[in-house]
Structures are given as structure tokens and as C-alpha cells.
Image (spheres, helix red, strand yellow):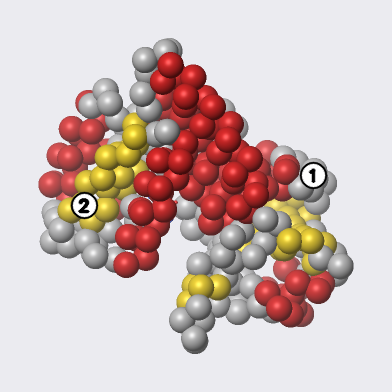
Amino acid sequence: MYKLIDGKEVAAAVRENIKAEVEKLSQEGKSTGLAVIIVGNNPASRVYVNNKKKGCEQVGIRSFEYALGEDTSTEELLSLIEKLNRDSEVDGILCQLPLPGQIDEQKVLNAISPDKDVDAFHPVNTGHIMIGDHSFLPCTPAGIIEMLKYYDIAVEGKECVVIGRSNIVGKPMMMLLLEQNGTVTICHSRTADLKSVTKRADILVSAVGKAGFVTADMVKEGAVVIDVGMNRNAEGKLCGDVDFENVKEKCSYITPVPGGVGPMTITMLLNNTLTASKNHKK
Ligand code: GUN
């Protein structure tokens, strides 16, 4: 019998703590602020940005939205970031990805001051994660670690398999599972015989971006399955990478989509913004 990992429940518990700490700072006359940049008209990005702003409001963090046009140049975006880097009201800067094709994404991420980089995408913060000395953790992987802790799911000594090698999820997920003493394998589109690798997993994390990608025959009996996917199925319904209905019966724990990893990603963004605020107001 599987147990559902309720991301909303874990997120609510963590957000209560964040809210209390933001309130404490506020009573000392120290506000906490997040600048949220969105470029262009990507509808999914608009939904994510609205949810991030709503999350800020819930815990008492001020959010400042900067919505730029689809034809914004790299230079225009860089000059906004330089202004926000200098703004003492702004503790965190988040630039929603993906950016339109004419913008040099890496240049933009490199321009965000590492002490305001609440996504933990700057190479300096990526380097800190690599050596296990970090103040900002990448939001999605950090949210997954929080969920595992909440449900007392031990990582130490476990076979952990991550499908996907993105800079945002796959690679930092590998580092955080390793930090928890998991034995980690990372799979990708060129992995030979993917099923033989995923079948070894005690903890399987899928960050592929394809509906129905993880099927029951790829999952070991009793596995913990974490679904990072955010896809639309043929009927236009939001779904993850995992064929949930068929996979769930093999699992000890599984995350749903929606209501699994998603709420935790935003929660960890709020947590990183709180960390930035505390660091700035020391
Ligand atoms: N696009 C998809 N996920 C993310 C994220 O975690 N942060 C940002 N900035 N953009 C994203």
C-alpha cells in the first residue's frame, strides 16, 4: 500500500516557520523583499510567477514584479539586474526561466549578485553546493530533501536514481542526495538501458518533462518515487512524468502532480529569500 507525499502539507508546515521569522525581522524594523522578473508572454511562466508572488504574500515577504516585453535585449535586462543588485529593499532577485531566445541566459544569471541569488543558479552558489558549503540551496532539489525528511524517509545508503541532468534540477539533486549519503546515479537521454538503472532505485526522482515517461516496469517494488515533471496530457490536464495510476501500486511513497514537488519549490524560494534577508540585515 503506497503513501502519498503531500507537498501542500509539508509546504504549509515550512511556510509557518518562514512566516514567523519574517514577522520577527519585521518587528525589528527589517522588511524582506523579493524582485521577480518575467520577460515575455510565456503562459506557464506567468502562472509560476503569480504563484511565487502569492507565496510571498502568504509569509509577509514583499514582492516587486518587473514584467518586460518579449523583445527585451540582454543589455536591458542586465541594467535592471544591476539596479536591483544595488537596491537595499531587494533581498532576493528571481529571473523566471526560460528567457526569450535573443537573451543570453547564462550572462543574465551570472549578473545576479550571489548574495541575492535566491534560485542558487549563479556559478558561485553552484560551486558552494559542490563543496557542501552553501547558504542558498536550489529550490526544487531542496524542497525534495525537505519532503523526504518530513516523511522520515532515510537517504543514507539508499540507491538513488535521478532521471534528468539539468542545471536546475538533475545536477543539484545529485549533489544534495549525495550530501545525505545516498548512492546516486544520474540518467539522461543517452543512458543505455534506462529501465535496468531505474529498477535499482530505492528513491527515484524524475525530472524529464514528458507525460507518462516513467512506467510501472521501470520501478522497483517498494520504491519512493518523486515526480518533478509539470506537463499537460492529451486532455490538457496537468500531470507529471510518472504514469501515476499504474506506478503508485508499486511504491512505498509517491508524489502527486499537482500537489507534490511544486508547492515545495516555491516554499524553498521563500526560505532562500528569508536567508538573504537575514544575511543582509546582520
Ligand atoms: N523556470 C522553471 N523552474 C524555475 C525555477 O526554479 N526558477 C526560475 N527562475 N525559473 C524557473
Residue 175 locus on image (x, y percent): 61, 44
Residue 152 has which mark? Answer: 1
**221 sits to left or right of 187:** right
Check disc 2: other Cα within 10 Å, few if <14, some if 14-19, many if 20+: few
Q: Is residue 121 left or right of residue 20?
A: left
Give the residue type that dot 1 points to. Answer: Asp
| Disc 2: which residue | 67
Percent across and percent down for residue 166 are 49, 58
Which residue occupies the foreground of this view, 149 or 236?
236
Residue sitting nearer the eye, 51 or 105: 51
Residue found at x 30% / y 30%: 90
Going by the image, does 110 lie left or right of 255?
Answer: left
Relative height, residue 105 to residue 20 (above, below): below
Quadrant of the image containing the N terminus: bottom right
Label located before the other in sequence (1 or 2): 2
Q: Residue at x 74, y 75 (%)?
A: 247
Under 8 Å from ligand 1: the CB of mark 2?
no
Q: Give x and y (percent) for residue 12.
A: 59, 44
Tell me residue 25's x, y (percent).
Answer: 45, 19
Three-letter code for the amino acid on which mark 2 is drawn:
Ala
Q: Which mark is residue 252?
A: none
Q: Residue at x 28, y 58 (%)?
A: 99
Can the viewer see residue 212? yes
Kind of element beneath mark 2: strand
C-alpha gap between disc 1 and disc 2: 40 Å
Q: Is residue 244 left or right of residue 131?
A: right
